[in-house]
Amino acid sequence: MKATIWHNPACGTSRKTLAILREAPGVEVTVVEYLKTPPSAEKLAQLYRDAGITPQQGLRLRGTEAAARGLPEADDATVLAAMAAEPVLIERPLVETGKGVRLCRPQDKVCEIL
């Protein structure tokens, strides 16, 4: 099984999720450091749709200016454009496999798609 993780190595939850993926038998992991290589607004829209959450639910509030900028109440297109332009606004880690997508907070949510 192939798995892609949008990863921030400075985040403990992201590191724990990556460890689960690497320890899972038969999983081939692709790591995307999204702060260096941000996903497009279109890719983010697909990930959130496949995860069954809204872009607002995928918005990182802690340590960002998202709330001050009114992003939690903004429309999807505005939130996605802001995330693509400033990937620090993306909550992490996102994991995509053939079984679906999860925002892995807590990290054990990744087991739902393995």
Image: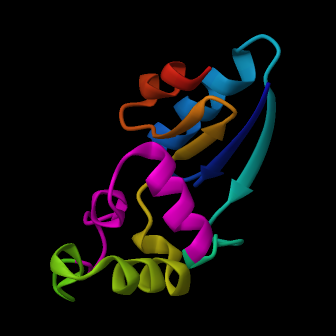
Left or right, 26 with reference to 18: right
> What residue span does the magenta drawing correspond to?
42-66
Q: Residue at x 44, y 22 (%)?
A: 108
Q: Quick check: is 98 in the magenta stretch? A: no
The colour scheme used to paint the residues is rainbow
Q: Specify the farthest residue to the top.
A: 25
Relative height, residue 21 to residue 87 (above, below): above
Q: Position of residue 56 (x, y in %)?
A: 28, 66
Q: Position of residue 68 (x, y in %)?
A: 16, 85
* Pick the front one: 43 or 27: 43
Q: Quick check: is 51 in the magenta stretch? A: yes
Relative height, residue 73 to residue 56 (above, below): below
The N terminus appears in which quarter of the rendering? top right
Q: Residue at x 56, y 25 (%)?
A: 113
Q: Residue at x 37, y 38 (%)?
A: 105
Q: Quadrant of residue 4?
A: top right
The C terminus appears in which quarter of the rendering? top right
Q: Residue at x 36, y 31 (%)?
A: 106
Q: Quadrant of residue 71?
A: bottom left
Left or right, 105 with reference to 13: left
Q: Position of residue 61 (x, y in %)?
A: 25, 66
Relative height, residue 104 to residue 34 (above, below): above
* Pick the front one: 16 or 28: 28
Q: Position of residue 46 (x, y in %)?
A: 55, 60
